Image: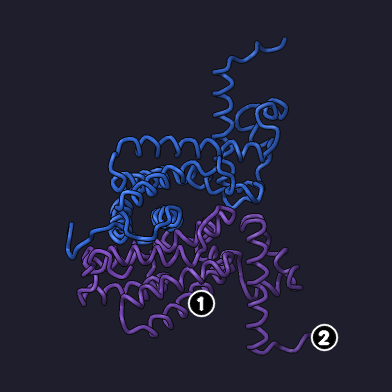
Chain colours: A blue, B purple
Amino acid sequence: MPRPPQSDEEKAQTRCRILDAARTLFDGDGIKAVSMRAIGRRVGLTASALYAYFPSKVDLVRGLWSDAKDDLTRRLQDISLAHADPLEAIRALGAAYAAFGIEDPLRFRVLFLWDDDSMNDDFYSREENQSPYFVLRDRVAEAIGRGLIAGPDDADLVAQAVWASVHGVVVLNNTCPDFPFRPPGLLVSTVMDAALGGLRRGIVEGEGR
Amino acid sequence: MPRPPQSDEEKAQTRCRILDAARTLFDGDGIKAVSMRAIGRRVGLTASALYAYFPSKVDLVRGLWSDAKDDLTRRLQDISLAHADPLEAIRALGAAYAAFGIEDPLRFRVLFLWDDDSMNDDFYSREENQSPYFVLRDRVAEAIGRGLIAGPDDADLVAQAVWASVHGVVVLNNTCPDFPFRPPGLLVSTVMDAALGGLRRGIVEGEGR
């Protein structure tokens, strides 16, 4: 006897369970080594039931990526809205990005695809895949426009420099957890203080120290 | 008839060829999926000949890691010796680290172990495995001692902030090559300018721009 059709909520829950299982298996064994069958087995689905949700492993990887990206974007947008001052917003965005990456390293690695080559080469070049970045860049452009940043008059260059600086803290923390790093929160605020200190206009000797 | 014994130079060459083959295979398929047999086959060695050089895959991974670390350490030491001024040295060390990571992403990834778990948990906590870091930290300590850095009076915190900032540029460049980043050299110098600008003593508005 056929099962009754699933509600939308049930379908969303199943999709979520599949993505969770895939994330765990990919992280343990690498994307290449994990079969769709193994993912289905972990969530109690037949191959054909699984394929109704994700027709291929690439779709699954993209689903994981897309969820993480949307999650990060929403979080950054909320942070940005909470800060009227663009420099305060940039600092808070850096801290939120670091928290996102450090609290769940697996999800953070998903965003960077485990260096997987199942994506197209032009994956990150598409604007719809850059939404978290645009949240930061918009506030950097605002800071430059208001004369709050004396550094290069190039919002992309400045935003990328800030992003890279805080990205490095997350990645080092997650890949070398046994290195005697200072606490990540302190390291993030030092990196942001240094970067914004060097970028913002009107620094005088000893100010703010 | 047994082959004549190899000279030390021949042995060093064979060791090098094994490491190159392992590096390529690990990068393509992941450490877990590559067998010692596959590595031996690639360099034309029997398993027993290979085991004479590297008794296990962990030894091979450590050999790769150790070579990359020694290479980076030597390069940073040379850069450090070439700069009497500690702030100039720190800036040049950042640029050299970035160049090391960008010119050969595979070797750079070796340094961070592909997130491999074949290492002990305390791998990076051992001082002998931190030699590249100490080159930077020594110059940061010198800059703090000479009053050239107004930031935190903690050489480890400052050195780690500088390291993380430039590390982020390398990692983003290598993991998202299709993202429309500004040229890596420009991004590295912007990151170092911003970080050192915020850290060093005596910044006045508009100085150096």
Viewer-proximal residue, A68 or B149? B149
Residue A171 in view, yes or no = no
Task: Establish if A172 lies above or below B66.
Answer: above
Residue type at the position of mark 1: Asp
Residue A59 in view, yes or no = yes
The part of the image, by quadrant, that contains residue A62 is: top right
Q: In the picture, which quadrant includes the C terminus of chain A?
A: bottom left
The residue that appears at 42% across and 53% down in the rendered structure is: A155
Work out whether disc 1 and disc 2 sit on a shared chain: yes
Label 1, label 2: how far apart the Cα atoms are: 39 Å
Q: Residues within 10 Å of mark 2 (few under 14, many from 20)?
A: few
The numbered disc on residue B18 is none
Secondary structure at badge 2 equals loop
The part of the image, by quadrant, that contains residue A9 is: top right
Task: Establish if B47 lies above or below A121.
Answer: below
Viewer-proximal residue, B34 or A91? A91
Q: In the picture, which quadrant includes the N terminus of chain A?
A: top right
Looking at the rendered structure, the number of numbered marks drawn on it comes to: 2
The part of the image, by quadrant, that contains residue A192 is: bottom left
**Could you say where residue A144 lies in the image, as x and y percent from the top left?**
35, 52
Q: What residue did someone put label 1 on?
A: B71
The residue that appears at 71% across and 88% down in the rendered structure is: B5
Secondary structure at badge 1 equals helix
Q: What residue did someone put label 2 on?
A: B1
Residue type at the position of mark 2: Met
Viewer-proximal residue, A164 or B186? B186
Parent chain of label 1: B
Q: Residues within 10 Å of mark 1 (few under 14, many from 20)?
A: few
The residue that appears at 32% across and 55% down in the rendered structure is: A149
**Could you say where residue B83 lies in the image, as x and y percent from the top left?**
36, 83
**Could you say where residue B146 lies in the image, as x and y percent from the top left?**
21, 77
Parent chain of label 2: B
